[in-house]
């Protein structure tokens, strides 16, 4: 893969606070490019009260609350990743090469309006399984509940909500990974113009990002009849009130760590539910109704067989058609709602880069493809030096 040298960008950085989110008016700044140990370090300088003020973007990131540079956190992360690999939740892959990191660095540095799309591969390193990797849910013959099944069958709804209730504690115990934190840092210094995620786990938000959740979030429950919504925690409380003995029996079982197989002796699934025997939900399990109209409640996510709400789909498409580069992280793009965004960006002339383990639906027109774990390559961008911050008009 041959990439051109990074284009020079106008730089506007006023102070540490401004570089991390707010750019004020009327500030003059210049940029110096230095090369050291084959790495570029972009340095921003400004005179404040007659004294020079200098700091690299890397130093600014170190001041950011989403920094992942502390040694203790890295050691803990390595230990946890080893656990996830043993459980085959994180797909096997060789570490990214220096060449891979350099190519991704250049891809970022040549973009002024980068759009990022993330998928389940972003969350496997947080202990949340995926569907399509070699050891994902589909490999064991798992079939997710469809929208039509959920709406038409009370038995299917009992199965879904019982399993989801049982897995909720462990699902919410998952923490943002190094990939989530690195992406939030890159977003905070202006290197990402727009972010969309297919994931429903809200781990991006917990890391400090603010993506468009293309497929919704499991943290909200909505009524299919009147549209009234409540938090998932409130819904959990309602389930417990309606099923006190059942809930007590479920909660008395060992929870285990995210990704472990201790709860019920069975595996957690990508959307947070756990496989449990029919005896836990077949008969004596009651589902709460909407508090406003008594209608059917459903997690505010797009199930298989359903469509992304039009307003949400239009926002994502508008961003894809207007970006100057499109980066896919941890997604095979097998769902049409995600693939059509990559295709639209390509048709608009934007180069496509993909970081994913295994094949994707866009491999035939991709500009840059790197087979790697997101958590092993994104943090290395921050360690390389500093990416230029595009100017704002």
Image (tube, rainbow, N blue to C red):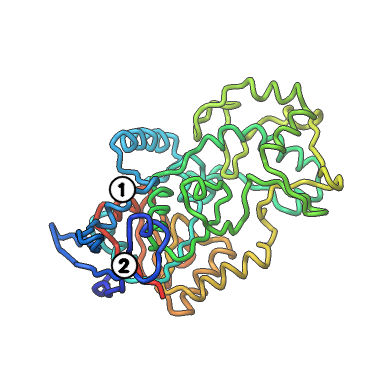
Indicate the position of residue 374 as horizontal and vertical percent values: 39, 51
The residue beneath circle 2 is 109
Q: Classify mark 1: helix, strand or loop.
A: helix
- Name the residue at 59% across, 40% down: 272
Residue farthest left in this picture: 37
Image quadrant occupied by the C terminus: bottom left
Q: Can residue 42 be seen in this view?
A: no
Above/below status of 360 relative to 343: above
Q: Is residue 286 visible?
A: yes
From the viewer's perspective, is 51 left or right of 90?
left
Using a 10 Å C-alpha cutoff, classify the residue at mark 1 as few (fewer than 14 neighbours), some (14 to 19) or many (20 or more). Answer: some
Q: Classify mark 2: helix, strand or loop.
A: helix
Closer to us: 372 or 296: 296
Mark 1 and mark 2 lie on one chain; the one further toward the N terminus is 1
Above/below status of 245 relative to 32: above
Image quadrant occupied by the N terminus: bottom left
Above/below status of 354 relative to 319: above
Q: How far apart are marks 1 and 2 (CA)?
A: 19 Å
From the viewer's perspective, is 339 left or right of 1?
right
Closer to us: 217 or 231: 231
Indicate the position of residue 48 as horizontal and vertical percent values: 25, 60
- Name the residue at 68% across, 43% down: 231
* Tally of numbered discs: 2
Which disc, if any, is residue 62? 1
Which disc, if any, is residue 198? none
- Name the residue at 49% across, 69% down: 342
Indicate the position of residue 25 as horizontal and vertical percent values: 40, 69
């Amino acid at each position: 893969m041959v990439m051109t040298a990074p284009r020079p960008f106008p730089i506007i950085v006023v102070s540490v606070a401004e570089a991390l989110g707010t750019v004020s008016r009327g500030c003059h700044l210049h940029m110096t490019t230095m090369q050291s140990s084959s790495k570029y370090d972009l340095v921003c300088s400004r005179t404040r009260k007659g004294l020079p003020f200098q700091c690299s973007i890397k130093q600014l990131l170190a001041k950011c609350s989403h920094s992942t540079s502390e040694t203790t956190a890295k050691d803990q992360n390595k230990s946890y990743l080893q656990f996830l690999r043993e459980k085959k939740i994180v797909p096997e892959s060789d570490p990214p090469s220096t060449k891979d990191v350099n190519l991704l660095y250049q891809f970022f540095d040549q973009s002024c309006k980068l759009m990022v799309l993330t998928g389940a591969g972003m969350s496997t390193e947080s202990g949340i399984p995926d569907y399509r990797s070699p050891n994902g849910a589909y490999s064991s013959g798992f079939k997710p509940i469809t929208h039509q099944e959920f709406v038409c069958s009370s038995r299917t709804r009992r199965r879904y909500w019982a399993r989801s209730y049982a897995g909720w504690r462990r699902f919410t115990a998952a923490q943002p990974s190094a990939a989530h934190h690195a992406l939030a840092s890159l977003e905070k210094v202006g290197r990402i113009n727009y972010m969309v995620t297919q994931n429903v786990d809200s781990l991006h938000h917990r890391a400090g990002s603010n993506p468009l959740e293309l497929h919704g979030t499991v943290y909200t429950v909505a009524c299919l009849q009147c549209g009234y919504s409540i938090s998932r925690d409130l819904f959990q409380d309602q389930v417990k009130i309606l099923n006190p003995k059942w809930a007590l029996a479920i909660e008395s079982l060992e929870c285990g760590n995210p990704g472990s197989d201790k709860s019920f002796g069975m595996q957690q699934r990508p959307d947070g539910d756990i496989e449990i025997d029919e005896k836990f939900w077949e008969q004596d399990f009651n589902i709460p109704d909407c508090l406003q109209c008594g209608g059917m409640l459903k997690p505010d996510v797009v199930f298989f067989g359903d469509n992304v709400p039009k307003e949400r789909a239009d926002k994502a498409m508008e961003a894809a058609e207007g970006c100057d580069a499109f980066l896919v992280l941890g997604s095979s793009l097998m769902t049409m709602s995600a693939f059509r965004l990559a295709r639209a960006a390509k048709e608009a002339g934007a180069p496509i880069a993909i970081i994913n383990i295994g094949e994707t639906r866009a491999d035939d027109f991709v500009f840059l493809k790197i087979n790697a774990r997101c958590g092993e390559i994104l943090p290395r961008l921050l360690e390389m030096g500093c990416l230029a911050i595009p100017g704002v008009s």
